Amino acid sequence: MKIIFATGNKNKMIEIRQILQDLGMEILSMKEAGIDIDIVEDGKSFEENAMIKATEIAKIARQMPEYADAIVMADDSGLEIDYLNKEPG
C-alpha cells in the first residue's frame, strides 16, 4: 500500500515520514509519484485548501496504474492574522 502526500516540500516530507513510519507503507510526495502540477488553492480555509490538493492529486493518481489504489493525503497551514480576518493567504 502507498500513500501520496500532496506536497513538494522536502522538509515536510521528512516530518510526515517520521510521523507515519510505523505504518509500514511507502510514503511519497506528489513529485516522487511523478505528479508535478501547480494546484490553485482558492479555498476559504486551510481545510478547504487541503481538500482541494488531495482531490486534485487523487484524480491524477487514479489514472496511474501504480497508484490507482494509493491513499492521498494533504494538509494546509499558515499564519492567521486577526487584522486580515484570519483568512489564509
Image: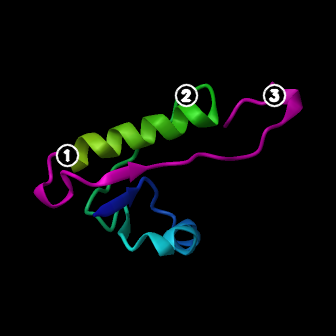
Earlier-in-chain disc, 1 versus 3: 1
Name the residue that disc number 1 marks. 62
* Crowding at mark 3 (Cα within 10 Å: few <14, some 14-19, many 20+): few
Residue at image position (34%, 63%) is 31
Magenta stretch contains residue 53? no
User: Is residue 65 left or right of 42 when viewed as pictured?
Assistant: left
Please identify the dominant SS of the magenta region: loop
The circle drawn on residue 50 is none
In the rendered image, residue 79, in percent from the top left (x then y), is placed at 76, 45
Callout 2: few (<14), some (14-19), or many (20+) C-alpha neighbours within 10 Å?
A: some
Of callouts 3 and 2, the N-terminal one:
2
Does the image show residue 52? yes
**Residue 28 at what x, y percent from top left?**
37, 67
- Label 2 vs label 1: CA separation? 23 Å
Position above or below: 87 against 2 = above
Residue at image mark 2: 43
* Mark 3, residue position: 84
Q: Secondary structure at mark 2?
A: loop
Q: Which residues make up the magenta segment? A: 62-89
**How far apart are labels 1 and 3 at the CA level?**
38 Å
* Disc 1 packing (10 Å; few <14; some 14–19; many ≥20): few
Task: Look at the image and tell me whether residue 40 can be seen.
Answer: no
Q: Amino acid at mark 3?
A: Leu
Which of the pair 81/4 is nearer the observer?
4
Quadrant holding the C terminus: top right
Q: What is the three-letter code of the residue carrying label 1? A: Arg
Q: What residue lies at 22% left-to-right and 52% top-to-bottom? A: 69
Element marked by disc 1: loop
Element under disc 3: helix
Give percent across and percent down for residue 54. 41, 43
Q: Residue at x 18, y 51 (%)?
A: 68
Tag 3 near tag 2, CB within 8 Å: no
